[in-house]
Image (cartoon, rainbow, N blue to C red):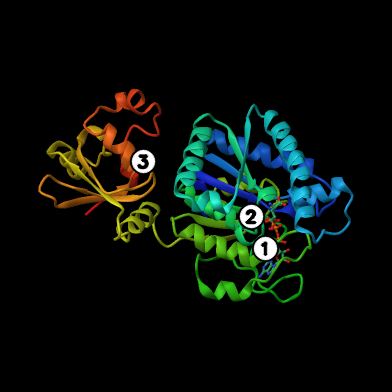
Amino acid sequence: MHSVIQQAKRLIIKVGSSLVTNDGKGLDSAAIAMWAEQIAHLRTLGKEVVLVSSGAIAEGMQRLGFDRRPTGVHELQACAAVGQMGLAQIYETSFRAHQLGTAQVLLTHADLADRERYLNARSTLFTLLRFGVVPIINENDTVVTDEIKFGDNDTLGALVANLIEADALIILTDQRGLYTADPRRDPDAQFVHEAKAGDLSLEAMAGGAGSGIGRGGMLTKILAAKRAATSGAHTVIAWGREERVLSRLAAGEAIGTQLTAQTAQLTARKQWMADHLQTAGRVVLDDGAVQKLTAEGKSLLPIGVTEVAGEFGRGDVITCVDASGKPVARGISNYASSDARRIVRHPSSEILSILGFVEESELIHRDNLVLL
Ligand SMILES: Nc1ncnc2c1ncn2[C@@H]1O[C@H](COP(=O)(O)OP(=O)(O)O)[C@@H](O)[C@H]1O
Ligand SMILES: N[C@@H](CCC(=O)OP(=O)(O)O)C(=O)O
């Protein structure tokens, strides 16, 4: 019995190129229809699902008549642009059959490295989930070159898991999970049912891609599990063609390899903030706000702030101090210092009229706040 997927409220599901495109033979509409049906089922169980799908390059190669992967970067990018249309079309059609809308989200490394774009991507994904839509994510291949690529969608899946604090990452691939060696090369390879995410011995077991279609192989999946675990997300690596794989995982069945995160989700996030000793700025709280934060576990609203010191951007970690200057909390600011200065001492209902836009009604959300 594996219960991490059963218990997960928010899930990232990553499907690899070889699965999506039937080993490069063209989009596998039957398989995609089955995942869509299962994802619709997961949603009826109250789970939020984000899909990370590879396959744009493989599908574009097919459509443009390449029988081997082109070597030129712009040819690959052109393939991705052509193939992405096929992905968008088939996902939209497959989910529509279950009255679910889809949304295309193409991300680059630069998007997630930039604090403001990171927060924007995060807010947009949360909003899509709130609208009941299934976001379908891929790397924005047409605008990236090697140095700034995620390079593989296993890594992208893990970063998205970190981005929206998913409880679990499911990586569907063309093997049943992790073996002690590449099963394509070593017939004696043993199946690994369960291990700790981040266990270094796993990295030695995992080899590169076996199919010529996929990019990362097993190593990027192991590293993705390690990365996802930093925000407390567990990973399951499973065979995408296993019958009803997603629904059975959601029912608690032990399928695939489970790589368990060792740190609880909130603890991991709070630890990250607590480790942020160099904060970009400081806000002074009135006594009421100190009370709300420390005794009631509430978010920090602009109205409870009397002063903003330093220069910081949206997404920076800032320190909250009481009227005497004593630090009481640390957290991620939803507003840049220039905007924060204008909205402090005001009720959140006035943010729109003061700034002309509203990022969030809180200055710091309690999930992004750690008490000192
Ligand atoms: N230890 C291992 N256990 C399982 N598969 C492995 C291992 N090492 C390497 N592989 C290879 O990794 C491949 C899956 O990676 P990849 O081709 O990138 O798939 P995807 O397109 O799903 O990301 C498998 O087909 C397999 O040959
Ligand atoms: N963005 C690329 C993803 C390449 C990739 O990571 O492939 P895979 O190893 O099959 O997940 C595409 O859509 O072709």
Name the secondary structure under disc 1.
loop
Q: Which amino acid, by three-letter code, is at mark 3?
A: Asn
Q: Is mark 2 within 8 Å of ligand 2?
A: yes
For the residues labelled 3 and 2, the Cα–Cα distance comes to: 28 Å
Indicate the quadrant where residue 28 lies. top right
Q: Is residue 351 above or below residue 2?
A: above
Tags 3 and 2 touching, CB below 8 Å: no
The image shows residue 40 at horizontal and vertical percentages of 62, 35
Question: Do tag 1 and tag 2 residues touch (Cβ < 8 Å)?
Answer: yes
Q: Is mark 1 within 8 Å of ligand 2?
A: yes
Q: Is residue 289 above or below residue 187?
A: above
Which numbered tag is attached to residue 153?
A: 2
Asked whether, in this view, residue 58 is left or right of residue 244, the answer is right
Relative side of 8 to 337, left or right: right
What type is the residue that disc 1 sits on?
A: Gly
Q: Is residue 204 left or right of residue 338?
A: right
Between the residue at mark 1 and the residue at mark 3, the CA separation in whole angstroms equals 35 Å
Q: Which numbered marker is on residue 216?
A: 1
Eyeballing the image, is 113 above or below 195?
above
Spatial separation of the CA atoms under disc 1 and disc 2: 8 Å
- Residue under the point 65% across and 69% down: 179
Residue in the image at 48% along x and 50% along y: 114
Give x and y (percent) for residue 197.
50, 65
Marks 1, 3: nearer the viewer: 3
Residue 334 image label: 3
Secondary structure of residue under mark 2: helix
Image quadrant of ligand 2? bottom right
